[in-house]
Amino acid sequence: MTYATSLTCRECSREFPLDPLHVCDFCFGPLEVAYDHDGIQSKISRERIESGPRSIWRYKDLLPVDDEFIVDLNVGWTPLLRADRLAEQLGMRELYIKNDTCNPSWSFKDRVVAVASSRARQMGFQTLACASTGNLANSVSAHAARAGMDAIVFIPHDLEAGKVLGSAVYNPTIVAVNGSYDDVNRLCSELADNRQWAFVNINVRPYYAEGSRTLAYEVAEQLGWRAPRQVVAPMASGSLFTKIHKGFQEFQRYGLIEDTPIRMIGAQAEGCSPITTAWRGGTTNIRPVKPDTIAKSLAIGNPADGYYALKTMKRTDGGATGVSDAEVVEGIQLLAEYEGVFAETAGGVTIAGLRQAIATEQIDPDETTVAFITGGGLKTADAIVEHVTQPIPVEGTLQSFEDAFAEAPQAATVGG
Amino acid sequence: MATRRVRFTFEGDAVTEPIIYLLGREFEVVTNIRMADVEQDFGWVVLELDGSHDEIDRALAWVEEHGVRVDPVAGDVVEG
């Protein structure tokens, strides 16, 4: 049984029923799920969580879904890797990588879509929908297939075939919108108001956003029931960033972990950094931008939760970073070469942002730090393909190998 | 009749133009401001528009021609 009680406006605190609503009717502020905290407190414990499934559903007491409606693709409980080699390279003492590339559709979007699709089913929807250029569409399509629901996915007409494939394999309806990125935004916003579809990040966004908190829950549990001192996470809409912090705060509130300060650092690519730009300018007014970066999964020019991300940074003595596309590639390479984790461009933004945060003294390299890697590298292979090791061509003879190997620059790094 | 909730973003000279007043005069659209924050050279206004679907579309196109960015109230909904 869920302990969710209502939707509450983040601006004016007005309450609404647990319906498919995302904006306050009075002030148009965003809505957020509210819970019966006393009820949760009376039930939750470390032992209860530890006895649960190895997925986000071990935290079902904290999620807005009743058990019988759960759409379960075994999302979450992804590895938390202690990253000593990368830490040494960056001059850090204790660094961890939360590796969310290991989710069923290879990105953290599975967490939010798992909750959104489950709640959509509970509210009686038969159709899941979204507008996406990649990860979100993949996850919506996969979850709809798993749940036996219909899926309709809106994409820009010029999206590369490789990115469409990650959704198409699950056989959703795919609509290619002939227009600009803004046209797709508008069309889907209007459709969400007029169709009986659960647009996961529009009319059921309050439930969708709740899934991100499970990242913090898992990290706290995997660290041995404690929060890290510092967090570096990518920012697109800003929702993931704020919900990670909220997740740690909730564990503190329920006494599951000690109440220690957590510094939140957000990472964006310079080609789409409206939140970082506002942070650097000392304002909470975010100026929308036209995205121009290889980190397409973070390319949200008008971020819905940017204001709240800025408030989280301020409240936690945190900060923000902005990195070039070249640094994004370096970040992907660092993570792959030193820890064996192949991340998509958003992961490159996180690692490059971590490096920048150290250089600008926004984080302390001696404190426990967790970097969130939110998607797998094969999703953005085109961003890295020209920057990686090339094969050494040889004939099938020992002499050919010895000759070619002696000439190859890689030979110097191969031991034995 | 249709209702649309949108966010106008003003930059530079557009900040001092009476765009919302003119919109109400030029088009058969009722404007209802719900939230706003305006600084010297930048500002945003969240408002509701009531009118026919086509008239709202025409009004929003006119607003954009005057250098004002128009977005859905929930921000960008196309995600990666």
Image (cartoon, helix red, strand yellow):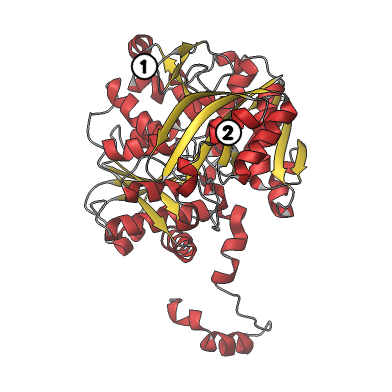
Which mark is drawn over residue A398? none
Q: Residue at x 58, y 62 (%)?
A: A383
**Element carrying mark 2:** helix
- Residue A112 position within the rendered picture, expressed as x and y whole percent measured from the top left: 54, 32
Which chain does the residue under circle 1 lie in?
A
Q: Residue at x 60, y 56 (%)?
A: A380
Which amino acid, by three-letter code, is at mark 1? Ile
Which chain does the residue under circle 2 lie in?
B
**Element carrying mark 1:** loop
* Tag nearer the camera, 2 or 1: 2
- Residue A46 position within the rendered picture, expressed as x and y whole percent measured from the top left: 34, 23
Residue to which mark 2 is pinned: B22
Residue to which mark 1 is pinned: A44
Asked if residue A29 is positioned above or below residue A323 in the image, the reply reads above
Q: Is residue A182 left or right of residue A58?
A: right
Q: Is residue A236 visible?
A: no
Q: Residue at x 29, y 22 (%)?
A: A253
Number of marks drawn: 2
